[in-house]
Structure formats: structure tokens, C-alpha cells
Image (cartoon, grey):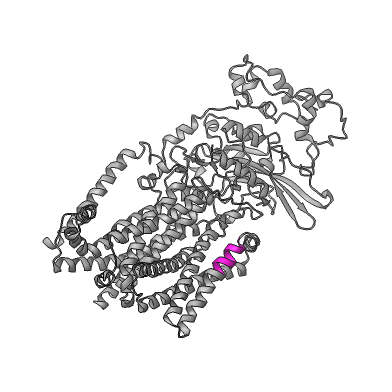
Amino acid sequence: MKDVQHLLRVAVIFIAAFAGFLFVRNLLVPESFGKLGHYRADSVDEFAAQPRHYAGEPACKKCHAQQASDKAKSSHKGISCESCHGALLAHAENPKSADNKPRKPKEAEVRAFCGHCHAKSLSRPARFPQIDVTAHNPDAPCSMCHQPHQPK
Amino acid sequence: MDMSIIEMLREALHKVSGFIYPNELELQWSVLIVLYPYITGLVAGAFVLASLERVFDVKAIKPIYRLSLLVALAFLLIAPLPLNVHLGHPERGFEIFLTPHTSSAMAMFGFVYLWYLMVVLLMEVWLDYRKEIVEWSRTETFWPKRLFYKALTLGVDNISPRSLEIDDKIGRILTVVGLPSALLLHGYVGFIFGSIKANPWWSTPLMPVIFIFSAMASGIAGVMLVYMLMCWVRNVKIDMPCLDTIGKFLLTAIIVAFSLEMLESIQTIYEAEEHFDIISLLVEGKLFVSMILIQIIMGSLTPIFLLGLVQMVELSEKARKFFYALSGVLCLIGILAMRWNVVIGGQFFSKSFLGFTTYKMEFAGREGLLSAIVVAILPLLILAALLYLLPPWPKKEEKAASV
Amino acid sequence: MKNFSRKDFLKTAAGAAFLMATRAFSSPVQAAEKFFREPPWKRKKPYYGYAVDTTKCIGCARCVEACKTENDVPREKFYFRTWVERYILRRSGEVNVDSPNGGLDGYLPPADPETVTKSFFVPKLCNHCEHSPCVQVCPVGATFLTEDGVVLVDKKYCIGCRYCIQACPYGSRFFNPVTHTADKCTLCYHRIKKGLKPACVEVCPTGTRMFGDLSDPKSAITKFYETENVMVLKPHMGTGAKVVYKGLDKEVR
């Protein structure tokens, strides 16, 4: 007994340390950890609660019904409003505010804006409508002949 | 947002060759992660050397048994430091112990490390030194040191022959258990890399084995150099049979490690899978100096030649000592280069196998060269403290030195 | 004494080997069970899926822009939750791939256009793998697969070890310099839980990107999965990638 006393003390230290570890662990592991899997379940709710910047197409129709119905009959029907006009949730929630106005290219910027998708490129699918921007009416803004919501 | 890193990445963008996935510009694991397998490798290697005496009864290396344990302990204490410093959230590092993900090698490593540190190494050192610790707690004149010894006795000053016999038996069991534990410790590090199927430079079942054997080589070389250095510092004659035996084990370890690495390379070249082209470019280009020149020629082939020469030709004691020292240094550098080639090399090429990014190691900063140097030096300082507090030299040598 | 310690060692080693052998035997049995299981979206509602029709992509990168805006992704050129790659295949067999600022900077016309045989765009994003290697390697359980099929990263729990970034074969993950945690596409979880589309799908002008509920047998995405000839990226890795691609060329990495 006397000859193993030092080993018993070591054993006591180990047991005490392990117990201490379990106690600390209980305090520190987040509440929701392990409920759904090996992760903090609250994290899923935190993700769901993240603020948005894009409104989604249905939000625009309420006020801009004309543009929406024009677009729905045209070849641009598959394009969401925010695709060209930028993130609009702030505008949809506060339409009168001057801060969150939808993006609209100025006349001088129109060719670059439309060309962003429609400039001819050999990487683009052949059946996609594309033109040589330098050859096709180079001085005129596209909107002179092509209405953006009903391009035809 | 750390603007120095952003600036560095903006510059790196111009140095990309070929195509990389846009997120691959930044290297995720820096020089600190190169040091970490190097340090755990030294631990494993030093411990294996100690086990050779205890378990396999290689009596010739008894003079360095305790020294090996202390070297292993000094490096083991520092091993988690580069890991924790490199984390994005070092303050959350303990989560690995609270909620370890059992499918993650990194998580399980935390427990293997704790097990090895507390149950194997600390216990073994304590049991081996307990008799002296009790004696020093009675005779030491410098009071802080005496207090330290007293604390280590855990308040028990029984050093009867029976208690020492029990200590020896438990110590022997610990060494037997410790040997696979040491291999597990470093094998796990190899597995952390080897199990990443996304990276073909890392992904191979041989990785844990390669890591273990190169670790043994570095650990043996490390202990050998510390032994030679300490003999010179203490003005004590080197035990040549001991040194010669260490030299033999070092040669064996380097040969096995090198053979495994070459086997891996030969297989890669032969199978020539999809990633073969980019890996050839990697080895011929970015890794030519660090791999072909430093790791293979300087760090493996040259020590094999020198140590092999010692085995085959009768050389004077002075010549042997020189060859051992030179081989040890080259081996240590070569294995550090090997860790660099694995960790950094594996991140140079894109997972698209179409291009390369670059790595600019900053000097200052959490993950810079300065940080790495500090991490590399700390174990040596700890070793110095351990050598002071728990001198591993046999009694009669101490008396001879003081005369 | 000498024989005792060697026998001791051999006994310990044999015991360990026995334990490992029994595990090795039971794992293939478990794996065989998994092999015949039906996909998770047959059992859970909802279960999100995603598809890409590369034959329609025009490389406008509106998706990249929208994702960065919606999710506050750092605007630097090395952090992307989604990006668009352009492939240029030449007669000589040479393949040129580029993704300037993920596609946001536009693509320069290729040199020597006469030598180009095929060229196309391929949008990339996190594949929300069923057997994702990134979830497997996370040491603390900060990244996980939700019950509805989305792989997320808990930025309050992630320790920033970057192991998951190393483990992803697709380059989908990055280290967020602001949160100092791993980051990646979340399938706009905050949007899809409210019945909206992910931002990238919302703004895609050509219908290249598709999203929906795989557990609904009548949804467009289910029909796409079941009727089109689709492929996943790096199928040999066995990641169980859920993003399927139509029209994936053999050169796509």
C-alpha cells in the first residue's frame, strides 16, 4: 500500500482532471449542439434569419404591373427584374425613398449594358441572340429600336 | 479584414500560371503547418529511440535513454502551438475537445495527443526520475528548484526498493503502450493529409507510414545531435558504442523512409493518373530545389552514402563523429524540406490540375517566418530548462564532469 | 526480464490487430447496407436540389454579382461562393480556362479565334454533397449537412482550421477574411426557407441555373434529374454531389 501511494495520487489527479473536464464541458458546449446532428442546431435558424437584399420577381408586379405584363409576353420573360435592375428589396419595402432607386442605365451606358449579355461571343450558345456591337448601329442606344421590357 | 493579407493576395493574382479555381489563390496552410508535423515527428522519433532501449533491450543506447525522453517531451509541449496560432479563431481551439467530430482525423488527434502527453510521456519521465526527484527534493539548496522537486513528488517520498520495482514495471508497460501511441501520434498527422482525396499530392495510403519513418529519422538525428552537442558543452567524452548504434538506426530509418517515398513516386509515375501532368510540372518547377535538391539529394541520398560508408569502411572516431554530425544535420534539413514539399507543395497546384498559385511567406505577422522561427526555437529553450531541472546524465558522469 | 517485455509487446500488438481486423470486417457490411438505400429526398421533405444547364450559359456573371450582393461576400477577386468559368477548346487539343474575377470582369475575346473548336461557360458553386468530404473532416462539427440537404458552415462555431477548404475537391470554399471562418455557398438558405429562389437562380437570365425541391415528384428540378442526361463534377470522388450538370464537356474540371 505504502509502496503504491504515489501511483494512487497520480490516479486521483487524473480522475479529478477528468471530472473537471466533464464539468467544464457541460458549461461550455452550446445548448442546441447535437439536437439534429453533430452541430449547433440553432445555427440553422440563424441562417434562416439572415437579412435579404433581393426581393424576388413577384415583389415588383404589385406596383409595376404594366412592365411585368409587357415582359411576360416577350422574349425577356424568363429574366427577373432584379437581374437588370439590381437588388430591390430595400426599394420594394420603401418605394418612395430616394436611397434605393432601381438601377437604370443612362443613355450613354445603354449599349454597354445590353451588350453585356448580347455582344457576340464565340463562347455563347449559337442560338442565343447576339450582335456585333461595333457593327450594329454603333452610335445609337439599343433602346431606340428595342424596348427593354418588350424587345421583340 | 487584414489588409496586409489582402495586399499580398492582390499581388499574387498576377503571378498565377495557368488556371486555378478563383478561391484557390490563397494558400490555406502556411509555414506553421509545415512545422507542426516536423515537431510531432521529432517527438515520435525521439521516443522510438528511447523505446529501443526499454523494450528491445538495445543496451548500447542506454546513455541517451533519458535524453530521448526529455527531447520528446520538450517538443511535444510545443506541438499544439503552431496549430493554435494558425487558427482563424484560436480562442475557440478548445472546441476540439468539447465536441470532437469523430470522423475527423484532426479532432481525434487532439485526444491522441493528450493521451500520449499525459499518460505516456509525462508518466514515463516521472516514474523514471522519481527516485532522483525525491532525493533532489531533500538535497537541493536553491529553494525554487527544491520547491519544484517537492511538488513533483506529489508529497510522497517513499523510494523503497519495492516502490521502485513497481515504478519500473509500470514504466515498462507504459513504454510498450507508448510505442504504438507514438506511432499513432505521428501516423495520425500523416493520415490527416493522406485521407484527403481531393488532393492527389497528399492522398495515398502510404502517407502515415512515410510520415512515421521520416519522423523516426528526424527524431533519431535530433537526439543524436543534442547528445553530441551536450557532450561538447559539458566537456564529456562521447560514448562511441552508443553513437555508433544510433548511427545504425538512423541509417535504417532514412533508408526505409526514402524507399517508401520513392515507391510512392514510382507508382505515381507508372499509373499516370489524371493528376500526373500537373504533379510532374510541380516537381520539375516549383519544387525542384526543395524536393530534388534538398529533400532527396542532400537530405536522403547524401546521409545514406555517408552513414553507409561508416558501416562499410573502418573510420577513425573523429571521422565517424564528423560523418554522424553532418548526416544528422542534412537529415534534419531534408525532412523539414519534405514537410514543406508535402504541405506547401500540395497547395501550389490547382485542383483543376490546370495551373499554379504562389506562396509569399511574410516575415512578420501571425503566420510569418518570424513566428515560425519562434515556434522552432521554443522547444530548444524548454529542452534547456528540462536538462537543467531533470539532468539526464548518469551519476558517475556528473562527478567526472565536476572534477 | 528480456523475454517478458518482448512477449508483452507482442501481446499488445496482437490485441490491437485483432480489434482492427474485426472493425475492418464489420465496415464493409455497413457499407453494403448504405449501397441499397434510396436517396434522402425520398424520405425527407423538403430536400433541395440544384441543376445547371451549361448549354444555356452566356457568361454574363449576373449570378456572381447577385450572390456577392445578397450574401455580403467580400468583393475582392479571391473570394467566391459561385463563379463562372470559360472553356476554350482548340483544334490542337489545347484547353484554355479562365474566370477573370469569377466572371465579373468579363471575358476577353480569345486569341486566334480560327483555331477554336468549342467554347462554353460553366457556372460553379458548392455541390452540397451527400457524402461531403468537407463535413467529414471538420474537427468540431461547425460544418454540417442539414436535414433538407444543404451544407452550411456555422460561423459562430468554426475555429478556422481550414481543413474543410483543403478537403473540398471543387474549390468551393474559401476563408472569409472578415469572419475568420470557412465560408461557401449556402444555397441562400435564408431565401429558400421563405419560398424564394437563391439569388443566383433568381437573376440568371437564360434559365441556366435551376433550383427546387427534390422530394416533390412533380417539381421541375425532379423532372430535370430524372429525364435529362446529367453529370456531376468529379464523379470518381464519390462525394455524392447534388448539383447536376447538363451538357458537361469532358474537358470540364
Residue occupying image coordinates x 87% and y 30%? A138
Residue placed most toward the observer, C202 or B380: B380
Q: Quadrant of the N terminus of chain B?
A: top right
Above or below, B359 relative to B185: above
How many numbered dots are placed on residues in this image? 0
Residues rendered magenta in the picture: B287-296
Residue occupying image coordinates x 38% and y 69%? B232
Which residue occupies the extreme top position in the image? A96
Q: Where is residue A145 shown, x and y percent of the image?
A: 84, 24
Q: Is residue B327 magenta?
A: no
Which residue occupies the extreme front position in the image? B403
Residue occupying image coordinates x 26% and y 45%? A20
Q: Where is residue B331 shown, x and y percent of the image?
A: 49, 68
Asked whether residue C149 appears in the rendered view, the answer is: no
Residue occupying image coordinates x 53% and y 73%? B302
Q: Quadrant of the C terminus of chain B?
A: bottom left
Which residue occupies the extreme left position in the image? A2
Q: Is residue B290 magenta?
A: yes
* The image quarter in which residue B153 lies: bottom left
Above or below, C136 relative to C21: above
Overall secondary structure of the magenta stretch?
helix
Above or below, A80 relative to C214: above
Residue placed most toward the observer, C240 or C67: C67
